[in-house]
Image: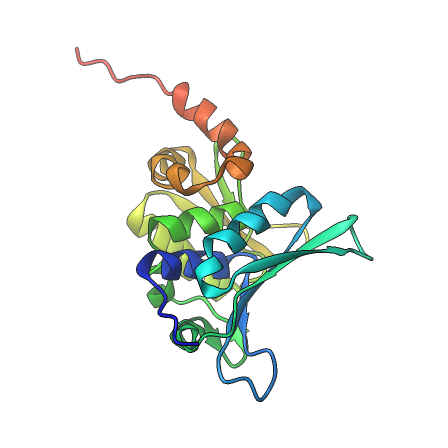
Amino acid sequence: WHTKIDDTERKAILGTLLGDSSILYPHKTSGAPRVCFNHGGPQAAWAEHKADFLKRLGGKSTRRENKGFGAITIAGATRCIPDLAEIYQLCVKDGKKTVSRKWLEQIGEIGLAWWFCDDGASCGRGFYLHTEGYSLAENKIICQWFRDRYGAASIRTGKRGYFWIYLSANTQRKILPIIEQYIPECMQYKLASSRACAASTPKRIRL
């Protein structure tokens, strides 16, 4: 109950909250929030990595039968901790996760890596972030943040009208060495094509 979240834990949490995790008060009488996440069987190792990383905060994962898509679901959660209340206030507005520039500015390198593990993909020609769950206004905030920090970024629209973020190959090359050190072995496959792209980049020759 009296656990204080350290800076690395905080940044990792802020990053995964942009992705597949949520922060909530379990019921109306809860005195503090907790962080929760669910992943399918193919990402079991990633869910377990999250739980192990957050074990000081009571992080645990449980395998459950999935009656929907996939055979199993890996459910993870921390304890309810008062020190998480500040993160809840930063990330949740009117009961819903709401992206802000203030939130993005605090995720750090590990937070960016965890966000990519949750929602990122690489096609070799750039990175994709599946931000379809956010509004156009929120995607504009995310896109501008990437532009200001790393380089070219744009908002793309899928067939169903949802929005997601595309980061150019040059932006990908800037981000890759920042995040790869924080990505566990089980998720390194997401970086394979981006490494191939970086390796094939021709060196500039001075004449």
Q: Position of residue 125 (x, y in %)?
A: 48, 31
Q: Is residue 6 at least partly visible in the picture?
A: yes
Residue sitting nearer the eye, 164 or 22: 22
Residue sitting nearer the eye, 20 or 174: 20
Q: Is residue 61 left or right of residue 32?
A: right
Q: Is residue 98 left or right of residue 6?
A: right
How many callouts does the rendering have? 0
The single residue placed furthest to the bottom in the displayed view is 29
Residue sitting nearer the eye, 58 or 93: 58
Write down the quadrant of residue 103 in the picture. Answer: bottom left
The residue depicted at 57 percent of the width and 57 percent of the height is 20
Q: Is residue 128 left or right of residue 204?
A: right
- Coloration mode: rainbow
Q: Position of residue 161 (x, y in %)?
A: 63, 57
The single residue placed furthest to the right in the displayed view is 67
Q: Position of residue 19 (x, y in %)?
A: 52, 56
Residue sitting nearer the eye, 201 or 16: 16
Q: Where, quadrant-wise, is the N terminus in this rendering?
A: bottom left
Residue 75, relative to residue 116: is it above or below? below
Residue 23, relative to residue 75: is it above or below? below
The single residue placed furthest to the top in the displayed view is 207
Write down the quadrant of residue 195 in the picture. Answer: top left
Residue 14, relative to residue 114: is it above or below? below
Q: Is residue 129 at least partly visible in the picture?
A: no
Q: Position of residue 159 (x, y in %)?
A: 67, 50
Q: Where, quadrant-wise, is the C terminus in this rendering?
A: top left
The residue depicted at 39 percent of the width and 71 percent of the height is 3
The residue depicted at 48 percent of the width and 70 percent of the height is 98
The residue depicted at 26 percent of the width and 18 percent of the height is 204
Residue 127, relative to residue 155: is it above or below? above
